[in-house]
Amino acid sequence: MQLIFGLLLLAAAPDLWLKRVEPVLSKDERAVYSSLLDEKAREAFRQALFAGKAITETEYFARVQHIDVAFGSGQPGSGANTDPGRLYLAIGPPTGVNRLPSSRIFYPTEIWYYDHVPGLQISGRVQFLFYRPKDVGVMKLYSSQLNTIRALIINNAGTRGLFPVNDVVNETDVRERLNLSPAEIDVLDAAMGVAKGVKNSGNSEILYLATSPREMLSRQRVGMARSRVSFNMERPKLETKQFATLNKIPAIDLTVTGTARGFVTVEIRDVESFENRLNFDAPKPVTYTQRVYLLPGDYTVLIDVDGFRTGFLLKVEKLTPSDPIATTQYPGADWAALGRQYLLLQDQPKAATCFKRALAAARSFDALLGMARLTANLDQARDLLLEALKIQPDNYEALLAMAAVTAEFQDYPLAETYRQRAQAVKRRDPL
């Protein structure tokens, strides 16, 4: 009964509904929903969403309700902002949990065991290690590639000085120098990888999928078969540099170096993505730099090189007077980027302010599309989208938004034309 009441409450509060389903929405679904101006059309979208998911609406909201209480602050959507919450939302409750709340060696840890996870294509048990860094805050998911075992070890009299500061601490070091209890050995084993036979970048691939509700709960689940052939590739490197724009907005240059043949994709998870198509005859060394404008905070950067996907952590600091100044890619680009972020955060007033400032600087595609999504005036939305399509005639999101706006004017043949153009773009550009 409580869950049914929660679903009715969400149906009566579309903004709350969108916040709760944001983790499972694909980029295309988010674009479609944002382009719908009529509440009846949005309601139809909400009712149809889970017909295309690998989970029922009831089960999904039951998971959401659980993670908000168990891992979040109890507020709607808070649980999905934590590592345990995203994993639970994406693949459900674990088969078993091994908790080590206190130890003379390790910070508090939890190991979640799953006998089988549909969509990962891994036979046998899978394990995920969570730890509380420095025994402060919420549990974080441990990655054998992004972290080292040193991150798990308490700096106390028993461990201090055992491992040189600049040395990488490995499994053998810990086993030889510390007298581990059976529970601590379990933690060490879980730190080595998520499953037997999976090493190096294979762990990163599994962790990315398992903590992505959007990937795991789609009908077309992303499996491991494509990535297995790439596990022996050299991991691409990511370097970051932070600047300040003239508008006092953080600008970050993301530079990817590696070997590629077909494409390099840079994704700021849950924010935006960029792709550079190469189409070389053979793999070649490449360096690809992408400038992004982000609000201060912590982000996950996913780099995909020819299907080899790996993740990095990015921390955007608050600006200081000493930060070097960088010019924007085009006038208003920084304001438009922040507008998109605020739009994703459902802060429409701040998004509108950013897009207005972007349009004052230049009538750019991003600013026009962003403002079109926010305006309730259909004539104004149509004019903004027409202007945007003159700049990028084959943009999928703009064409889809134009189809929705045209349908509101009851010009259904023209709306269908725009929709077909959008689908044609999607078929040409499936990545």
Image (cartoon, grey):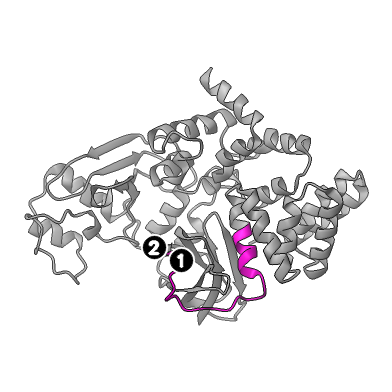
Residue 178: give x, y in percent of width and height: 9, 55
The disc label shown at residue 185, or none: none
The overriding secondary structure of the stretch rendered in magenta is loop
- Residue 284 is at least partly visible in this image: no
Q: Which residue is mark 2?
A: 201
Marks 1 and 2 sit apart, C-alpha to C-alpha, by: 9 Å
Relative to 177, say whether 364 is above or below.
below
Residue in the image at 92% along x and 49% along y: 413
Magenta residues, as a range?
A: 317-339
**Side of 408 where 342 appears, left or right:** left
Q: Which residue is mark 1?
A: 230
**Residue 277 location, quadrant:** bottom right
Residue 64: give x, y in percent of width and height: 49, 34
> What count of labels does the image hold?
2
**Side of 403 where 146 appears, left or right:** left
Residue nearest the viewer, comparing 51 with 199: 51
Q: How many other residues sit within 10 Å of disc 2, few (<14), some (14-19) or many (≥20)? A: many
**Quadrant that contains the C terminus:** bottom right
User: Mark 2: which secondary structure?
Assistant: helix
Q: How many other residues sit within 10 Å of disc 1, few (<14), some (14-19) or many (≥20)? A: some
**Residue 167 location, quadrant:** bottom left
Q: Earlier in the sequence, mark 1 or mark 2?
A: 2
Residue in the image at 61% along x and 63% along y: 337
Residue nearest the viewer, comparing 308 with 237: 237
Disc 2 marks a residue whose amino acid type is Ser
- Residue 229 is at least partly visible in this image: yes
The reply to whether callout 1 and callout 2 are in contact (CB within 8 Å) is: yes
